[in-house]
Image (cartoon, helix red, strand yellow):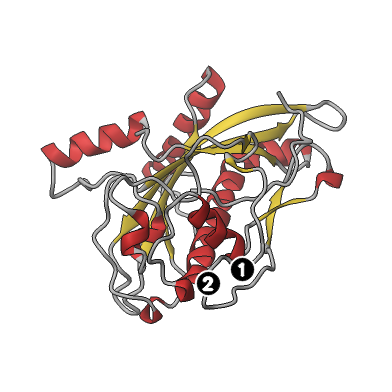
């Protein structure tokens, strides 16, 4: 799953799960097909023939040169594809996520619907795709991406309070075929306790490298975050698909382990002491 676009490689830098409702009106799309293991979220729309059975995001894969910042092709055309029937927007949405180490590197950008379609066709994953659904697909990608960043900001809040400098996103990698240890644990628990734990694997995984400020003019500390993306039951009121993002620092070092322990244990401690958030 490739959500960000980066036109250059100028960057040199060598919270618990929460629900999110999809903002797209899926009534305009075909009936969703069953989720497959490690499938990109576009599979829940009308892309029955384009996603195939491999679960690989159609934007990625292949042997061409990819941008190391985001595992996306270095250049994707904004021109209409041969045989394309509907003219798609070429405007790219600017995210809220700071890019690289410095302010002059701006914000990450999302691909336009036309770029997304061209990327899928370029990877041989666009045969039979409903062109009318591409814009909704991009909106879903952008929506989930913003949700993941908001969860990361919650994790980083205590460091931001100390330095008064917001974290930034250095790079990210999609790993749809690699189950995280936590996801594997949940799958095992789902088999043993099916009435309590979800037995379905996440449909995608991302590893994001976040830059945590060490203080003004003190540089940055790279922190790897793991994000598992799960499908949730459709919203009862609207019938729209819902998602759960499980975002947390990777267990790469003792500090991350401590952050994870304190992040999840502190609310339990407050509850045990009779303290409740308003």
In the displayed structure, 38 sits above or below 50; it is above
Residue 84, labelled with which disc? 2
Quadrant in the picture for residue 234: bottom left
Q: Position of residue 163 (x, y in %)?
A: 77, 36
Q: Secondary structure at mark 1?
A: loop
Q: Residues within 10 Å of mark 1 (few under 14, many from 20)?
A: some
Q: Position of residue 130 (x, y in %)?
A: 42, 71
Kindly identify the residue that appears in the image at 36 percent across and 73 percent down.
240
Residue carrying label 1: 80
- For the question of whether residue 273 can be seen, the reply is no
Q: Secondary structure at mark 2?
A: loop
- Left or right: residue 151 compared with residue 125: right
- Left or right: residue 119 compared with residue 192: right
Q: Extreme top residue here?
A: 254
Viewer-nearest residue: 92 or 50:
50
- For the question of whether residue 109 can be seen, the reply is yes
Q: Position of residue 265 (x, y in %)?
A: 42, 36
Q: Position of residue 59 (x, y in %)?
A: 50, 50
Q: Residues within 10 Å of mark 2 (few under 14, many from 20)?
A: few
Viewer-nearest residue: 213 or 130:
130
In the displayed structure, 198 sits above or below 214; it is below
Q: Extreme front residue here?
A: 82
Separation of marks 2 and 1 at Cα, in angstroms: 6 Å
Q: Are marks 2 and 1 in contact (CB under 8 Å)?
A: yes
- Left or right: residue 97 compared with residue 10: left
């Amino acid at each position: 799953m490739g959500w960000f676009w980066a036109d250059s490689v100028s960057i040199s830098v060598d919270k618990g799960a929460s629900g999110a409702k999809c903002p797209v009106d899926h009534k305009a799309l075909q009936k969703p097909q069953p989720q497959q293991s490690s499938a990109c979220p576009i599979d829940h729309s009308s892309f029955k023939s384009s996603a195939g059975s491999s679960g690989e995001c159609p934007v990625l894969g292949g042997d061409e040169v990819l941008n190391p910042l985001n595992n996306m092709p270095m250049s994707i055309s904004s021109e209409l594809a041969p045989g394309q029937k509907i003219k798609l927007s070429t405007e790219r949405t600017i995210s809220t996520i700071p890019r690289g180490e410095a302010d002059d590197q701006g914000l990450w950008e999302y691909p336009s619907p036309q770029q997304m379609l061209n990327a899928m066709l370029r990877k041989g994953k666009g045969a039979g795709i409903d062109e009318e659904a591409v814009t909704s697909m991009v909106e879903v990608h952008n929506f989930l991406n913003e949700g993941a960043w908001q969860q990361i900001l919650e994790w980083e809040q205590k460091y931001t309070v100390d330095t008064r400098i917001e974290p930034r996103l250095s790079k990210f990698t999609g790993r749809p075929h690699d189950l995280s240890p936590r996801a594997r644990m949940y799958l095992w628990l789902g088999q043993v306790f099916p009435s309590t734990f979800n037995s379905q694997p996440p449909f995608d995984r991302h590893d994001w490298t976040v830059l945590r400020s060490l203080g003004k003019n003190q540089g940055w500390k790279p922190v790897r975050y793991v994000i598992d993306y799960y499908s949730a039951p459709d919203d009862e009121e609207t019938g729209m698909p819902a998602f759960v993002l499980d975002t947390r620092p990777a267990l790469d070092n003792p500090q991350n382990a401590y952050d994870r322990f304190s992040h999840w244990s502190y609310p339990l401690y407050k509850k045990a002491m009779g303290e409740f958030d308003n």
